[in-house]
Amino acid sequence: MKKLYHALCKAEAALCGAGFVLLVALIFLSAILRFFKVSMSWNTDLALFLLAWTAFLGADIAWRSGQLVGVDLITRKLPKMAQKIVTLAVYLIVLAALVVIVIFGLKLAWMERLRTYQSIPVPFSLVIISLVCAAFSMCLSTALKIRRVILDFNT
């Protein structure tokens, strides 16, 4: 199970990195071609598509590695046991919110399955699926964080 999770994490990081590089290349190419009065109408839609995927997958990568912004001004003054309880409560709230995002994101993706971008024949639901995939991956990461906190209660 650990190998599968680590493979998922590596694939996610590779996909996010490749998407970001492609996004930057598309925007740069569009700027250069615009200088020469060459229009690429599909570039904006593809850039928005890549931006959604890289942003949401990047959010999971940041969440997993603990690099998201957190405020511990109040909790750091609490005793260790109270800090663990607050951390567990926050993780459970985050997990509940992520499950809601996955459920309603799937419903929204199904409703938007016929809608496409204006200039590229890609269903708009694929952008919504980026949120669902990232939220599902964040659910796995959060479940592992919850497990670590619970196992840490014994020490």
Image: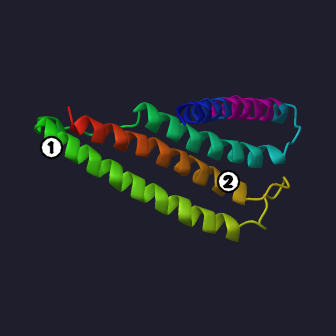
Q: Is residue 134 left or right of residue 94?
A: right
The amino acid sitting under disc 1 is Ala
Predominant SS along the magenta part: helix
The amino acid sitting under disc 2 is Val
Q: Earlier in the sequence, mark 1 or mark 2?
A: 1
Q: Is residue 95 left or right of residue 57?
A: left
Q: Position of residue 12 (x, y in %)?
A: 62, 35
Dot 1, crowdedness within 10 Å: few (<14), some or many (≥20)?
Answer: few
Is 2 a magenta residue? no
Residue 74 visible in this rendered orientation of the protein: no
Label 2 sits on a secondary structure element that is: helix
Residue at 69% across, 71% down? 111
Q: Position of residue 123 (x, y in %)?
A: 78, 59
Q: Number of marks in the image?
A: 2
- Tell me: residue 68, above or below residue 90: above
| Residue matched to label 1 | 82
Q: Is residue 100 left or right of residue 23?
A: left
Residue at 51% across, 40% down? 60
Which span is picked out in magenta? 16-32
Label 1 sits on a secondary structure element that is: helix
On residue 154, the disc is none
Which corner quadrant holds the N terminus?
Answer: top right
| Residue matched to label 2 | 127
Of tags 1 and 2, which is closer to the observer? 1
Residue at 70% across, 28% down? 21
Q: Nearer the viewer, residue 151 or 105?
A: 151
